[in-house]
Amino acid sequence: MDERLQVYDTKMTKTMDNLEGELATIRAGRANPHVLDRITVDYYGTQTPLNQVANITVPEARILQIQPWESSLIKAITKAINMSDLGINPNNDGKVIRLIFPELTEERRKDLVKEVRKKGEEAKVAVRNIRRDGNDTFKKLDKKEDVSEDDIKWLQEELQKMTDRYIKQVDETVEAKSKEILTV
């Protein structure tokens, strides 16, 4: 791949990684440890990601179990989960914290699918903005460097093919996540 295109491929890959990370935090009725990725706990005065201060397991399909490495963290973890946008009340027995995920209603599933599609659209916009930046850069090449119009046209065509490939990937990712959410 041409190194002038490589920069934009890297940016589009980061956009896809970001989308996949955001979609992983949307819960689809089943317990998924990634819903806790954004939660941080006050650990000796430092905000620390939950997965760095506790072991997170999935003992059953709709239950997450959080076992802190230090029992003194139970209150801080419970507080952090309550303050988050998860909408689940943690239960603890003094040693472990359990999050029980309720079955999603059909209405809630449809809302989640809308949220997934919105995130997909945001990712597509980001990919298109990267393409626009690339095209602007390529148009300036003929003025600064000794690059032929044919080369610039080729670079723009390759960038468009790359953009189409990433847009298709975004659509497939959004469709897979929507299907997962709607599956009862």
Image (tube, rainbow, N blue to C red):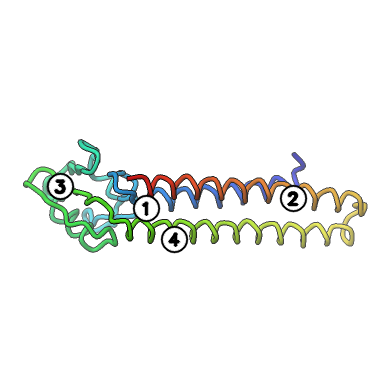
Between the residue at mark 4 and the residue at mark 3, the CA separation in whole angstroms equals 31 Å
Q: Amino acid at mark 2?
A: Leu
Q: Amino acid at mark 1?
A: Ile
Label 2 packing within 10 angstroms: few (<14), some (14-19), many (20+): many
Q: Looking at numbered disc 4 in the image, what kind of residue is underneath it?
A: Lys
Give the residue drawn at x 59%, y 57%. 124
Q: Nearer the viewer, residue 179 or 54?
A: 179
Q: Which residue is mark 2?
A: 159
The CA distance from mark 2 to mark 4 is: 29 Å
**What residue do we see at 9% from left, 43% from top?**
95
**Which residue lies under the disc numbered 4?**
114
Quadrant showing the C terminus? top left
Q: CA distance from mark 3 to mark 2?
A: 49 Å
The residue carrying mark 3 is: 97
Nearer the N terminus, badge 3 or badge 1?
Answer: 1
Q: Quadrant of residue 126?
A: bottom right
- Please tell me whether mark 3 sits on a helix, a strand or a loop: strand
Q: Secondary structure at mark 1?
A: loop
Nearest to N terminus: mark 3 or mark 2: 3
Please tell me which of labels 1 and 2 falls first in the chain: 1
